[in-house]
Image: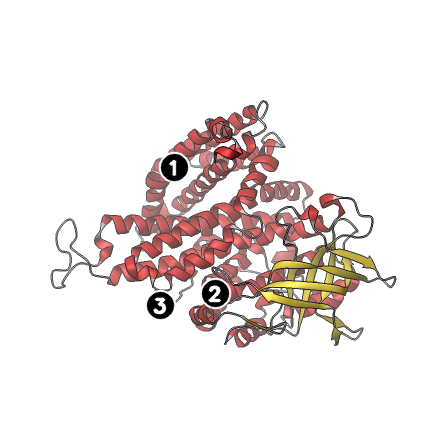
Amino acid sequence: MADYKAPLRDMQFVLNEVFEADKLWASLPKVAAVLDTDTASAILEEAAKLMSEVIAPLNRESDEQGSRWVDGKVTAPDGFKRAYELFCEGGWNGLGGNPDYDGMGMPKALTAQVEEMLQAASMSFGLAPMLTAGACLSINAHGSDALKEKYLPNMYSGVWSGAMGLTESHAGTDLGIIRSKAADNGDGSFAVSGSKIFITWGEHDMAENIIHLVLAKLPGAPKGPKGISLFLVPKFLVNDDGSLGERNLLSCGSIEKKMGIKASATCVMNFDGAKGWLVGEPNQGLACMFTMMNYERLVVGIQALGAADMSYQNAVEYARDRLQSRSPGGAQFPEKAADPIIVHPDVRRMLLDMRVQTEGARAFSTYVATWLDKAKFSEDAADKKHAEAMVALLTPVAKAFISDKALETTVTGQQIFGGHGFIREWGQEQLVRDVRITQIYEGANGIQAMDLMGRKVVANSGRFIELFTAEVQAFIDSQSDNAAMTEFVAPLQEAMMRLQAVTNDVLEQVKDDSSAVGAAANDYLHLFGFTAYAFMWARMAAVSLPKQSADDFYAVKVKVARFFFQRQLPQTLALAANISAGSASMMDLNAEQF
């Protein structure tokens, strides 16, 4: 199994050359006050050392051992507690946090790179700071000043961690039917009761306190999702002087035995009149949660990207070393018993499929992160509104398309190993198991597709799509006099026209067919994803073409871009045909005929 090596050169390329992050950061005063290019480079280099030297070596053994639950107490795998201490001592837990409460205030475009390294090193470990960051986002956006002052500094420092209590056994996507209740204690606090499942790191021994954000309903609340409120419920109550008080009335009933991410504790959490405090306004819990959802859903895509990149690193190392048969053109290494399998066209196909998806995902996730930064930090109201619309449009694609393709990528990496890919010691089967959850949690990918097609396209008659189209068209126009870019720009233009055509097709279908959105959603999301990646690869090619003769990095980037346009983008033709076919054949069978 290969040792994890953070792809720093590619990250720097995407940040500094493709998206010119230094110009973006300089245009955002709050970011410019804390960050420049040199500082960003230093942060990435230090993160790479921590992830590769401290966290990645724990990944396989922690998967074997798993978290352990005994009498309500959860113990993290060996090495996790010390690694978490080192992670927090370096300030990584508060990298993107609000500086007013001791966070570092870094933009998402930068923290996204650190998150990729962390998730590639160990998804199970990475979930702990990921959930803490999500909880902090909601508290910072919607909590009272008193809650922020009391909880955020210790959460940013990692002394306390965070967890999100949304799901119940009968209520997954449909949170409107949750049964958890909250009763007013009359002193500004509430008694929260109910049982939550699938609570990642809801209990553990790595932090002194765990701050749960729990969805529950107040007495007399409206039915459905409009009656949900959000409560901050600490594992240990916090005294006025900041010290920890008595244990709150909550407990871990069990942890799940899972397909993957076995080292993380996925908990059943029971709240038995636990004391909590309202975050935001009554009955506005979902709005408070969705503040962090765009960030968290992007991070889930980044999780998947990390696993995919680790699988690619493993597969390349193996393909260079594994000897099997001779090259179709004759022996490439006649002194050896056989040639390494990397000489074979089909192995190269698999490796390039992995590479274009991984590097495309890195560029796309960074692209989405830049829009998040504009939405958060811009001081221009029009720019902020534009960025918010782009975030709304792109987030479901970032979550679902990246994770769907990451599963394919990890399976392909396993396939390159042949039988050895099925054996635990090589690490490839763990990546397949671990990445699978990214298609399910934080909103299953089918829901992401429905969100994109239904809410972000049909509900506003394609206005968000028009913003993305204008962005892509501006790039295409900028390359009109660059003949060398024709091989990339021409198919990008065709893909955009195809996306526009099927968008209009669905907008027509929905006038007469209530099933049109659901029938088109998955294919539409993937069509959008391939088109967005084409935009990313064209932008990377535009930067690389003038530099390819001077540096092999850029020459390789152009070659890989060429593979994407020739061998992957044509999949949009089949996807478009699926969408245009409508829902009739899908809905024709009745339930008993399945």
Q: Is residue 352 visible?
A: yes
Q: Amino acid at mark 1?
A: Gln
Which residue corresponds to the image point at 50% horizontal and 76% vertical from the top-left?
A: 78
Q: Where residue 56 sits in the image (x, y, percent)?
A: 44, 69
Q: Quadrant of the N terminus?
A: bottom left
- Residue where numbered disc 1 is placed: 571
- Residue where numbered disc 2 is placed: 122
Task: Report helix, strand or loop for mark 2.
Answer: loop
- The answer to whether residue 207 is above or below residue 456 is below
Residue at the limit of the structure toward the front, as seen here: 592
Closer to the camera in the image, 12 or 562: 562
Closer to the camera in the image, 471 or 456: 456
Q: Amino acid at mark 3?
A: Glu
3 or 1: mark nearer the eye = 3
Task: First in sequence, mark 3 or 1: give its number.
Answer: 3
Task: First in sequence, mark 2 or 3: give its number.
Answer: 2
- Residue where numbered disc 3 is placed: 425
Q: Amino acid at mark 2?
A: Ser
Q: Where residue 225 sits in the image (x, y, percent)?
A: 71, 45
Q: Where residue 594 sits in the image (x, y, percent)?
A: 47, 36
Calculate the distance from the C-alpha at mark 3 to the C-alpha at mark 1. 35 Å
Name the image quarter holding residue 97: bottom right
**Residue neighbourhood size for the residue with mark 1, other residues' Cα within 10 Å, grouped as few (<14), some (14–19), many (≥20):** few
